[in-house]
Image: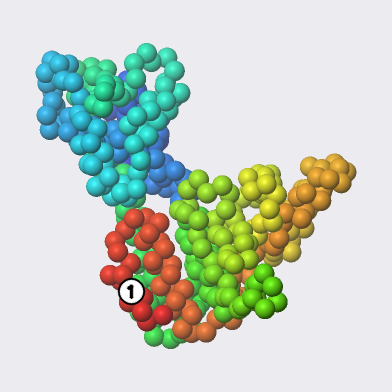
Amino acid sequence: MQIREKFVRDILEKAYPDTFQRVYDESPLLQYLDYKMKAVHGDSKTRRSLANVYALYSILYFYRQDFYNQPNLYRAFAGYDYTRLFRFYRSLYGGSKLQNHALNSRVNGEFRNRFPALSNDLIIMDNGKYLLHIDYLYVRGHDISQVCCAVIETYIKLLEAKDHALFRVLENIRALSDASKKREAVKNLLTEDAEARIFEIISYAILKSHFHGVTVYFGYTPESVRAERLELYRTGRTNANDGGIDFVMRPVGRFFQVTESGDYDKYLLDIEKVMHFPVTFVVKTEKSGEQVQKELEDYINVRANGMAILEKRYRSAVEEVITIRNLREWIDALKNTEIDRIIRDIDIYYRLEMNIGDPSETWNTGNF
């Protein structure tokens, strides 16, 4: 069986120079971990599976200290307390917002789906205590917990380095003294190759600034009409279960959905999620908004196959299509001080997205 990730292969080959492939082939746990590591080279929509990985790592971490190469002693062990494990994996990089689902069921369910022929669960649960089944900790008499920990620890280091790459780019942009160079540098972040999470955050920062100065008038009666500025809010993190909505604008109640997909069926699925409420799509493409909207309308016509009710339902639900071209044009229209605010917002919201540091330590938000 082919080892997916090079760093996994390197770790195994160092630990078992002559038998690393056989150890891998005979270890469902190593195969499962290898399968969960693809985010190191995927884009940021690739699931990092931190909950599942950390659930396993929390048990492996303490097991390695207490029971390494002691199978008979471990067989009598009743398991680690849930609170101890939960606190530990929430203390790890990017783990502060993780829930307990992985420990309680998710890992075992996914593991069973991946290895249906195996009869034992990977994690044994017993009244709030958790441990790994010994079947998966030994391969031909070798305790593989050290290697499994090394794989997970390397995975996290690689993710951390990848996450911090944007911060280094932002630091370089902030160091520029020429405002026009800052503007161009921000525009250069908007590409079709940009990671989805980064594109969503940059798009939000630009849209937030673009609509910042727009005033609308609301009131229940002519006498109660008052002026209000448009405000844009993110609904949650990139991979959050947000019901298909990434940004919401108040007070007008406008919905924005960020997407990189060329699969127009996904657009219709997003529309279905919000019960056909009008949606503005922000698309990671160099095409014009008009071209994307035309292609979407053509797809709607194919799906509807002449059914007027379906054509009307979907067309009326597409409020606007915004693409990279629009976002770059709006950057050009912003004042120099607003470019600084965009750079600040990208930094702040990316830190929040990644659970990294305190944004107030980097920016004096009172300056903007």
Identify whether 252 is placed above or below 79: below
- Pick whichever, 49 or 69, lies toward us: 49
Q: Look at 41% across and 63% down and name the residue there.
A: 349
How many labels sit on residues? 1
Pinpoint residue 187: horizontal percent, then vertical percent: 52, 72
Pinpoint residue 112: horizontal percent, then vertical percent: 42, 22
- Whether residue 264 appears in this view of the structure is no
Identify whether 291 is placed above or below 20: below
Please identify the quarter of the rendering in which residue 155 is found.
Answer: top left
**Which residue has dot 1 on it?**
363
Q: Say few, some or many: other residues with alpha carbon within 10 Å of mark 1 (under 14 / 14 to 19 / 20 or more).
A: some
Q: Look at 43% across and 73% down and name the residue there.
A: 343
Identify whether 240 is placed above or below 142: below
Q: Quadrant of the N terminus?
A: top left
Secondary element under disc 1, as helix, strand or loop, is: loop
Does residue 43 appear left or right of residue 260 in this picture? left
- Pick whichever, 248 or 345, lies toward us: 248
